[in-house]
Amino acid sequence: MADALDGAAGLELFRTMWLIRAFEERVGQLVRENEAHGLVHLSVGQEAVAAGVCGQLRDDDAVYSNHRAHGHALAKGAPPEAVMAELMGRDGGLCRGLGGSMHLVDAEHGFLGATGVVGGNVPLALGSALAGRLLGGDRVAVVFFGDGAVQGGIFVESVNLAALWRLPVILVCENNGFAEFTPRSAHTNVERVSDVVGPWEVERETVDGNDVEAVRGAFGRFLAAARTGEGPYLLECLTHRLRGHYEGDPQRYREALAAEEWQRLDPILRLQRRGADDGWLDEEAPARLEAEARARVEEAVEAARESPFPPASLTTELVYAP
Amino acid sequence: MTTYLQAITATLAEAMRADPRVFVLGEDVAEGGPWGATAGLAEEFGAERVRDTPISEAAICGIAVGAAQSGLRPVVEIMFVDFVTLALDQLVNQAAKAHFMSGGRLTVPLVLRTQGGAGQRGGAQHSQSLEAWLTHVPGLKVAMPSTAADAAGLLASAIADPNPVVYVENKTLYFRDEEVEDDGPVPLGRARVVRPGRDATVVALSRLVHESVAAAEELAGEGIEVEVIDPRTLVPLDLDAIVESVSRTHRLVVAHEAVVHGGFGAEIAAQAQAAAFDELDAPVARVGAPFAPVPFSPPLEDAYLPGRAEVAAAVRAAIGRG
């Protein structure tokens, strides 16, 4: 179980969230400048989920992610320069430039992969959890997915099997209320994802996903139980995607959030207020930590720029494992 | 004597005895499945390694992919190749591409066993030959054994391979028996000359191998000596063996049960003519099913299925005796 949020833990979360925020904002810029490429989905606004979950995992715990994967990868320990280089299509990228934004993999840190097909990652996490059980040990598997994934058949198939086999897997839903461009209410009558898994009696909790302490606390309880071989668990994090579905999305389908409303919801500002109240974040710390994060990202951009594009021969070399 | 089916069961058992990471999963596998391919495995290896699943092809395939990425060697059974349609996201988007998209850092050592083919009045949804689809996906290997010896040898190689291998059995061959000497694994990508001949080469897949041998015997009575080659795996394809044969016979017929249109025979024909155009004295002929679903009514199904008569006719036409 996660300990109460003390200064050390709070600062670590604050750093992780700022790293993700700074990274994502910089990526947005690089996409517009045509330096980062492809279909890019940013997680600005959803940082608390990645930080609150991944910060408690070990390298041998498996994490599967979706199309909005940068934050999950960074929080799981992927080096920012390697993530950035991947988005730029460079040889020094996490996947040597063969994956891209929606297919990040960092096996060394247990980030077993993002997938661009909504819902397709859920059974992979079950398989990884099954491997953990059959090979022994207490590692667990975690899968991130959005509320849009829940309406797919693969989700139901997977929940049924995870529950039937009692797999040590934690399903983490980032419910930002939008499946691509459409509000959840237009796709389903079931408002809460946690209600969907009710018939299987999956232990579940819905938390304010912009409250990193709530995410960390609920996930920590599930993680402690999963370490003993129990499962599955579902954690629904209600959150807000501040930017469009993808970079370049004109977002005609929703009103922009009022600035003051965002001040209230922003997971970073909320942790900042909490840290100030509890006395572990002094007045000048937020600006300093933000600057550190932005500098770290700038280093990553520079390092990624140094990396060459992969040789064209790589395309045919890596189709099959030797 | 060993049947094709017994060869499969025995090879699975041997692989599971030799390597604790090997396990099987699929619908009714603990009971042995509709033909008994996995019969007895649950008794020897227990329910953890012989995992009965619900009718959830997508999830079972995805679980196998995740398990393979985390250190196991799953052999997943999809009861009919017609149902692979339900698992294509997992097979095509996840299994086939994980090694590539991760820059070579993930491997997916999984075997997907399935069976296809008509002839048992199964109707259009339980009788198809869909192997050509699978050969079109870089990252998958595709094996189609025609004999008990190859069923054993190819399955052993498939299980040992670090890549996803689709292993397509033929339901009408299950109870065909033969003397099998244990020659160990059959390497993926090495064709077998089933019958030597000097006048024409027939490259045949799965059930059509036996039909082609029967046609060759009939043609021998007319003074025509046909060489029959079974490529055994479609990906990788042993083009060298085909070209070597064609350079002696100068005539090529490709025979499979699948619909001719877009079938794998088209690929063999294209590759062979590109590699051995000067050796060919006649256009490459293709034998297969008409462009129609498999009909149910027994006389219609019998008429639909390509067999020895069609192969013999194609050979006669190729050598100008048609």
Image (cartoon, grey):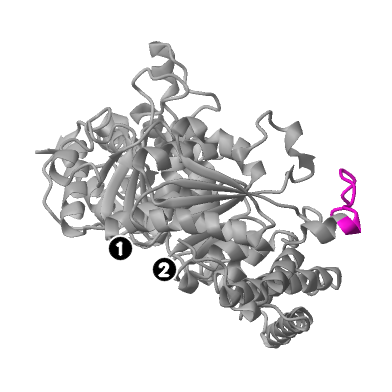
| Image position of B138 with respect to B106: above or below | above
**In percent of the image, x 23 and y 41: which residue is there?**
B47
**In percent of the image, x 87 and y 45: which residue is there?**
A254
- Mark 1 secondary-structure assignment: loop
Q: Amino acid at mark 2?
A: Asp
**In percent of the image, x 26 and y 33: which residue is there?**
B173
Q: Quadrant of the N terminus of chain B?
A: top left
Left or right: A280 with respect to B45? right
Disc 2 residue crowd, few under 14, some 14–19, many 20+, Cα 10 Å: some
Q: Name the subunit of mark 1.
A: A
Taking the view exactly as shown, the residue that stands out farthest to the left is B1
Write down the residue under mark 1.
Answer: A137
Which residue is at the front of the view, B58 or A279? Answer: A279
| Image position of B143 with respect to B98: above or below | above
- Return the disc, 1 or 2, that comes first in the chain's sequence: 2
- Mark 2 secondary-structure assignment: loop
Q: Are marks 1 and 2 on the same chain?
A: yes
User: Which label was assigned to residue A60?
Assistant: 2
Q: Is residue A284 visible?
A: yes
Whole-percent x and y of residue B11? 19, 49
Q: Is residue B130 visible?
A: no
Specify the segment rendered in magenta.
A249-260
Whole-percent x and y of residue B271? 51, 55
Whole-percent x and y of residue A34? 82, 71
Q: Quadrant of the C terminus of chain B?
A: top left
